[in-house]
Image (spheres, coloured by chain):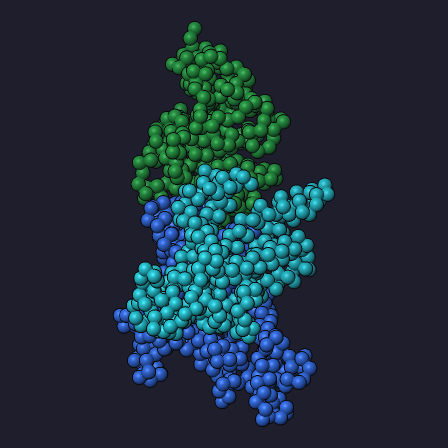
Chain colours: A blue, B cyan, C green
Amino acid sequence: MISYIVRRVVMAAVIIYVVVTLSFFMVRLMPGNPMDYLESQLERQGNLTPQQVEEKVHAIYGLLPNEPVWKQYLQYMAQAAQGNLGTSLNDPGQTVVHIIAGALPWTIFSVGVALIVSFVIGIAVGTVMAAFQDRQLTKVATLFVSFISAIPNYLVAIVLIYLLADTYRVFPTGGAYAADVNPGANLPFIGSVLVHAIMPIASYSIVGFGGWALQMKGSAVSTLGSEYVRAAEARGLGARRITQTYVGRNSMLPQVTLLALSLGFMFGGSVFIETYFNYPGIGYQLINAVNSRDYSVMMGCFVLITVSVVISNLLVDLVYPLVDPRIVSPAGRRSRPGARAGAEEQNVPVGGTVA
Amino acid sequence: MSDLMRDFWRILRADKSALVGGIIVLIYLLTAIFGPVIFHLSNVQSAANAYLGPSVRHPLGTDFLGQDVATELILGARPIMEVGLMAATIITLIGVVIGLLCGYVGGLFDDTVMRVVDVALTIPGLPLIIVIAAIVHSSNPFVLAGILSVTGWAGLARAVRSQATSLRTMDFMAAARVQGLPLRNIVARQLLPNVGPYVAIHFLLGITGAIYAEVGLFLLGVAPISGTNWGIMINLAMSQGALLSSRSLIYLFAPMAAIVILQVAFVFFSRALDSLFNPRLRVQ
Amino acid sequence: MAPALVALKDLTVAFGDLHAVEGVSLEVGQGDIYAIVGESGCGKSTLAYSLLDLIPPPGRIIGGEVRVEGRSVVEMSRAELQRLRGPRVGMVFQAAMNSFNPVVTIGAQVGHMLEAHPEVFPGAGEGRAYFRQLLEMVRLPPDRVLRSFEHQLSGGMRQRVAIAFALLLRPSILVLDEPTTALDVLNQRLVLEALRELHATLGVTIIFVTHDLAVVAELAERVAVMYAGRLVESGTVDEIFARGRRHPYVAALISAIPSVLQPGLRVGPIAGQVPDLAELPPGCRFAPRCRLARAICREVEPPLIADGTGHSVACHVANEKAGLTPSGRAVR
């Protein structure tokens, strides 16, 4: 058990380290990298001495461009560890950390709620589909659900905007809350936040619930047919107990694995959804930074999105043994269904693992 | 091999949605290949003709520059599918090769590479793709395909490696080695038939994922706008106010529909492959 | 004869158009150790499941009766079935290793059983104490087993735990489907000894299904042999193994024992194969493979004829040789 926890934590730390290193690589070493770009831009301006150019670059990125690379790397890592990710290119008054710290809660809020919503709806739909698996309606429902999950989430966002914001003015077209509301723990603010969050959350969920539903249907069907359920019936266990502890708990297990995958996908998707709804989360800031060539903010957003995903995955991993005790011991791992090669991969999410 | 094809036809006939999906994919492929040969976009750009409604001359109306939407739609297929196919191929090749190597070689090599795979699986692909694309700032299809593949290969590598490992430790592998069967033979006869189905399905779904990400890149303007493709069409439509009038909506919705239809077709078609390779479903 | 505890009369079970069990009648008395023997696919497991109305769909009972303690199982309501399963009849599935919920401890699952049948052990903790006793009877350490998950126990241990589960609610009948098949020789021995001891101590009636004649010889008192869905011979274990009036299939099985001491009697010295239930031969189902087959065997299905001691055989040739007609009396 301890070794399981330790391994997961170490892995998370390693990935975060890799990501920060990766971002250094992109900032400094890739062809066309932003620091070189900035340097050449400043030099072309012509009115700065090389010394001043260096200082300007240093002010923004915290790195001295003429030092040997490995030294810059150490500087970068040291600063990152201290929570200094540089300042915004376009708005030198703001630190990157300040910008992304303001944005992160919105993304966590919308993505988090969307995850819960798609999870709940998906599980419910999937369970119903499994319970009535032989009916014609289920076949139609399966097709319909597959159809919906294949639609890219940004297209759903556009359609929602068209239908509900422009044409019928049901929901606001964007923003996290109305302009005339005071942020704070007051009811108008909270109400406004919720109303503004509905469309983004709907965009995530409409596309997202399908994966859960199909996965749940598959695992519920296989659990229903398994030996231990029949044995439980043979022992005269009540229907409620069987549904809850025998079918229910075992069907849910693959869902938790799916959770980790979905987290990454949804955080990635926030890039599109937040841009279209002008929702000031991390994804929005990332695209903003990209379009305005604000590389330091861009890197900060990237690192933060990835770190968020890594930490969420870690949390899921740590909670998982509570649901499935088998993962903690080697004998248990072998006895899990899908421990066989490829079996658990049968439900590849739409898009493989590209996004 | 031939009874594989026979079963495949049977499954397609039984599962109508898969059949329709396959046909649609084929149509798109043909459009992508032959479209630009047959159709050409006129060079005339006149704002006076902007957002004309559907007519005989312009079945889908015109865009904000007065150009024919239908032509743009057809021409827009090739760039999207090109990059999608290339990215999926890269992903599949890398994934299979790494998976086979790890599975067969095992040991420290296997352990280290698998750690790398875990990292690639955890890092969310899309933000990384966006950031790289923003820095590199190129519309070159090969470059785009490469960027899109940056994390997609990892899932396949893991699955292929599991198969390869389990086969490696089986007794008959030892027997085959003792008999001196060449590696090629073992790979072809034992590994590929087991792993093939998953690779094929992953390939198809990889195309959908690559198209999703690629269109997204063009949509957000992260990949520079050059030429015409569906993502660019939607991007320009949104920024040029296509939502505002009902005649211009077609310019916005046509490429969206094209994308959705293609993605759905791929997904349904891949279900036929899934049935084909699932022995329980296949043997009637 | 003592009144039958379990009585099957003309039972026919269908899976779609195929009859997995065809017109089987047998009786199990109180305290018997009764074996149902046959090859894979002969319908013996289906027979066992019918006792609890647990035939897996799409199987359905389409004819005949299944009576447990005099009451028809098929006519029972859901609530009555729940009272049957566990407290009256305990079942141990084939490969019982998989009959446990993988994410819940054994102890918790004991709790589930007790909560579903609170009438069996009124006092708190009585049920758990009895379970610990049962575990000891099957030679397992109670503390360890109760707090383990199923994957932490070996296959043989799980099989014995499954037997304890089946006996927890003090049923009068214990049904086991292939209790020793998935086990190594050592664990087989342990299970058989445990069953014998349980029978001696608790007086429980045991019905078990197997294809392993060696197990039958060791454990059973009465035997019923099935072939392709039909009952072909039944009697005491001595009568079955004796060289007298016998069904040719049984004779062939027994003579095959020394050389075929392994699961899966399909590949044996008996030429030919079990008939496909979708394409049954006319007349006796064993005729295509029988050395003694005559013209009548290929036309008329042999009736099951009992002699004076209750030993029944369904074979034209064997019964004629013994001078038995369907009325049970000697011809001459």
Relative to A341, residue C87 above or below: above
Identify the residue at image location x=60%, y=71%.
A18
Residue C31, horizontal then vertical, whole percent: 44, 32
Q: Which image quadrant for residue A58?
A: bottom right
| Front position in the image: A111 or A70 | A70
Q: How many marks?
A: 0
Q: Is residue B176 left or right of residue A85?
A: right
Name the quadrant containing residue A277. bottom left
- Depicted A49 relative to depicted B29: above or below: below
Say if residue C108 shows up in the picture.
no
Q: Nearer the viewer, residue C88 or C55?
A: C55
Q: Quadrant of the N terminus of chain A?
A: bottom right
Looking at the image, which residue is at 39% across and 15% down? C326
In the rendering, at what x and y percent does residue C181 appear? 55, 37
Residue furthest top in the image: C332
Instruction: Report the residue at 56% width, 22% height from top.
Output: C271
Q: Position of residue A197 (x, y in %)?
A: 35, 73
Is residue A73 visible to us here? yes
Percent of width and height locating residue A333 = 56, 55
Q: Residue at x 39, y 36 (%)?
A: C59
A47 w.r.t. A111: above or below: below
